[in-house]
Image (spheres, rainbow, N blue to C red):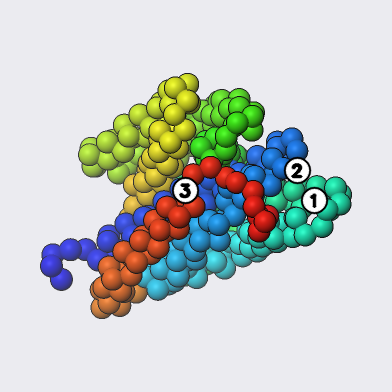
């Protein structure tokens, strides 16, 4: 239809949903990771209220991503959710604990009560970010799939050096993203105290980013295959480098909005590079890459189904984007504590 490859279109749409989730939920996961660094109870409440109106809406992007994968690439959905069952249960627990921590934290005034939920919020946020990174690392290097597309390994097999390195980089990336967001949303003495954290998180991310890049080039050589076949993809690499390089410049100039935009571009570029490296695969088999891997063609629904869903997505996506924009516009500006604040 129209000379377009609907499989490629849906692969791109999943990439958009994943990038949207990583950008939006990435900063509130980062706020959770940095939460214990707040010195006073008031500071921690400000941290929470900076994401309070937004965090649950941000996670809708993840739900939509999962639903789109189920409908467009059901074989991939079945393989991933069965093979990564233990990891997904841990992720689900982490996301639940984040929500519970936010809601329960200020219900009682006792120090022990609030401290317990503060550290639960931090641990759950860090675990969620780590698991997302580990999933990306495993997708890049491949997992043990048999000829039926079933995962034949164990949970511990997913925790290899490379996936854990990508997981650590993801934690650092979200922590940096979250620190920039906090600098954008706070003011006065608290904003001054957040400022050094920007440099610490950026430095940590840069070190892990460079190690991950080197490790990828050495241990996952097929990751650059599509860049050789499609030279235009190097523009994404250039965008990534420029976005990362502009973050410390914007921080130094004390332009938090500029820094946050660069951080968003960094996240989007990394997700794009992941998609380009993976394409046309959805799940790579480390046992027999050519025969057992799930691709956008052998793991997809029928063309008719994909086109019908594409029509629904075209109609629904503007509504989702408009709603998201309205919410962020409504809660723009610095954080203020009020009667109904967390």
Percent x, y of residue 19: 41, 51
Asked if marks 1 and 2 touch (Cβ < 8 Å), the reply is: yes
| Residue at 32% in and 42% down | 225
Viewer-proximal residue, 50 or 138? 50
Label 1 to label 2: alpha-carbon separation? 9 Å
Q: Which residue is mark 1?
A: 114
Task: Provide the residue designation for mark 3.
Answer: 332
Residue 29 in sight from this viewpoint: no
**Among numbered discs 3 and 2, the one appearing first in the sequence:** 2
> Reading the chain from its start, which is encountered first: label 3 or label 1?
1
Residue placed most toward the observer, 144 or 156: 156
Q: Is residue 307 above or below residue 127?
A: below
Q: Quadrant of the C terminus?
A: bottom right
Label 2: element kind: helix
Residue 312 visible, this orientation: yes
Which quadrant is home to the N terminus?
Answer: bottom left
Determine the secondary structure under disc 1: helix
Q: Residue at x 37, y 49 (%)?
A: 275
Residue 67 in the image: state x and y as whole percent.
Answer: 45, 70
Q: Is residue 258 left or right of residue 96?
A: left
Q: Are marks 3 and 2 in contact (CB under 8 Å)?
A: no
Residue shown at 50%/70% (left/top)? 78
Residue to which mark 2 is pinned = 41
Query: Along the horizontal axis of the image, is 184 left or right of 223?
Result: right
Q: Dot 3: few (<14), some (14–19), or many (≥20) neighbours within 10 Å?
A: few
The quarter holding residue 41 reads top right
Instruction: List x then y, in percent, for residue 85.
Output: 61, 65
């Amino acid at each position: 239809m129209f000379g377009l490859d609907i499989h490629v279109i849906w692969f791109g749409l999943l990439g958009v949903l994943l990038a949207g989730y990583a950008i939006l939920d990435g900063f509130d996961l980062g706020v959770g990771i940095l939460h214990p660094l707040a010195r006073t109870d008031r500071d921690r409440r400000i941290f929470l209220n900076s994401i309070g109106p937004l965090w649950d809406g941000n996670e809708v992007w993840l739900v939509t991503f999962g639903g789109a994968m189920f409908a467009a690439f059901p074989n991939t959905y079945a393989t991933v959710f069965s093979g990564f069952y233990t990891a997904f249960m841990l992720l689900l627990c982490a996301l639940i604990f984040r929500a519970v921590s936010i809601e329960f934290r200020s219900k009682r005034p006792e120090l022990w009560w609030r401290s317990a939920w503060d550290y639960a919020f931090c641990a759950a946020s860090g675990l969620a970010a780590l698991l997302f990174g580990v999933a990306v690392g495993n997708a890049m290097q491949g997992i043990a799939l048999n000829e039926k597309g079933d995962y034949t390994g164990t949970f511990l097999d997913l925790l290899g050096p490379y996936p854990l390195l990508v997981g650590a980089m993801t934690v650092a990336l979200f922590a940096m993203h979250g620190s920039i967001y906090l600098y954008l949303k706070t003011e006065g003495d608290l904003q001054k105290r957040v400022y050094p954290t920007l440099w610490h998180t950026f430095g940590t991310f840069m070190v892990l980013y460079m190690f991950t890049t080197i490790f990828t080039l050495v241990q996952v050589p097929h990751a650059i295959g599509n860049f050789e076949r499609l030279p235009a993809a190097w523009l994404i690499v250039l965008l990534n480098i420029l976005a990362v390089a502009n973050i410390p410049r914007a921080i130094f100039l004390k332009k938090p909005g500029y820094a946050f935009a660069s951080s968003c571009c960094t996240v989007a570029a990394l997700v794009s590079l992941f998609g380009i490296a993976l394409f046309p695969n959805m799940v790579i088999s480390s046992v027999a890459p050519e025969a057992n891997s799930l691709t956008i063609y052998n793991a997809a629904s029928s063309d008719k189904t994909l086109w019908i869903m594409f029509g629904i997505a075209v109609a629904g996506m503007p509504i989702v984007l408009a709603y998201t924009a309205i919410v962020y516009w409504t809660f723009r500006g610095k954080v203020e504590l009020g009667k109904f604040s967390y």
